[in-house]
Structure formats: C-alpha cells, structure tokens
Amino acid sequence: MNSRLLWMPLVAFVVVAALFAWMLPQEPDRQVRSRLVGKPLPDFVLAPIATGKPGLATAAFRTGRPRLLNVFGSWCVPCAAEAPQLARLAAAGAPIDAIAIRDTRADVAKFLARNGDPFAAIGDDRNSSVQLSLGSSGVPETFVIDGQGRIAHQHIGAIRDEDVPMLLARLEAAK
C-alpha cells in the first residue's frame, strides 16, 4: 500500500482540528442585521401614537434630507437608556422620527414625559409589521435613512455616547 495513503486520515484530522481551534475563540455575531441596508424603505403608513405629533409614512423619508429612524418601545429599558443620546443627536440638528412597537398612547406619553421627546413624528406599529419589514429584530434600533428613502446604515442596540459622532457622520455621508 502506498505510504501517502496511510497518512491521509491523520492529515485530514489535523486540518479539521486546526480549523476548529482557529474558530473556537472567535465571538459569533449574534445580531440579526437587516438585508435592506442600501435599499429603499418598504412602503408603510403608520397612524400617530403621540398626542400633537404626526404619524409616519415612507413618503416622509423621500424629501431629500437624511433622517434617523428610531425603533423603540416604552416598555424597553435600553430605549430609556439611549434617550440622552437621542437628545444630543437632536440638539446637533439630526432630524429623528420614531416607530413605537407594540405600545399604547398612554404608555408612550409617559415614556416621552419621563425621558424626553426628540422625535418629529412617531408612528404606531402595534403588531411590529413595519419593524419586521425593515429587518429590525429588536428594540432599540436606529436607521440612517438617506434623502431618497434608502436605508444607509443600521445601528443595533442602544445608542451610547461614543456612537453619537458616528451617527452624525453617517447622516452627513447620507446627503
């Protein structure tokens, strides 16, 4: 028998073991990213959920000016934690709209009174259908939408202090 054939199982085992050893320490990406980044927003029209604020529709994002779209819930603890950063973004001139997920008018009013209200419009997505059509898998998530209504960037999770300059730069780049 050929001596090379005798060594093939050992070589195959070493290659597979090396692959496992290389992959083992790497942290897997557990975030579900939207496949719509770079593509137009899906069509939607959401009724208003906050008193004195309009609802939200896809057409609002096709005005030639980039905007942030924040997906939140009044029941979401990280959503409350990111409120100061949303206020910073709004103070820096970032237009921000929101979609409230599985929420009520009363709970959204309490949330905004407690955490501030940086939003120009807030749409009511009671059954999460728009959230899911955006490719959003949870709350909070924030999307940078360019002036033509395309998703330019997706930020998964709560916005932290160090994320504010990056989001402002993404908004500027989306012009």
Image (spheres, grey):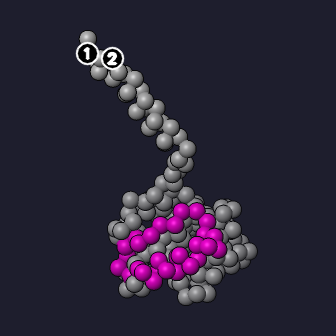
| Extreme-front residue of the structure | 3
Where 7 falls versus 95 (above or below)? above
Q: Residues within 10 Å of mark 2 (few under 14, many from 20)?
A: few
Say which element carries label 2.
Answer: helix
Amino acid on which the number 2 mark rests in the picture: Leu
Query: Residue 171: x, y in percent?
Result: 47, 80
Where 83 falls versus 94 (above or below)? above
Query: Residue 170: x, y in percent?
Result: 47, 77
Q: Which residues are magenta?
A: 147-174
Residue bearing the label numbered 2: 6
Amino acid on which the number 1 mark rests in the picture: Asn
Is 150 magenta? The answer is yes
Residue bearing the label numbered 1: 2
Is 148 magenta? The answer is yes
Q: Which mark is residue 87?
A: none
Name the residue rendered at 46%, 32% in the picture.
17
Which residue is nearer to you in this view: 5 or 131? 5
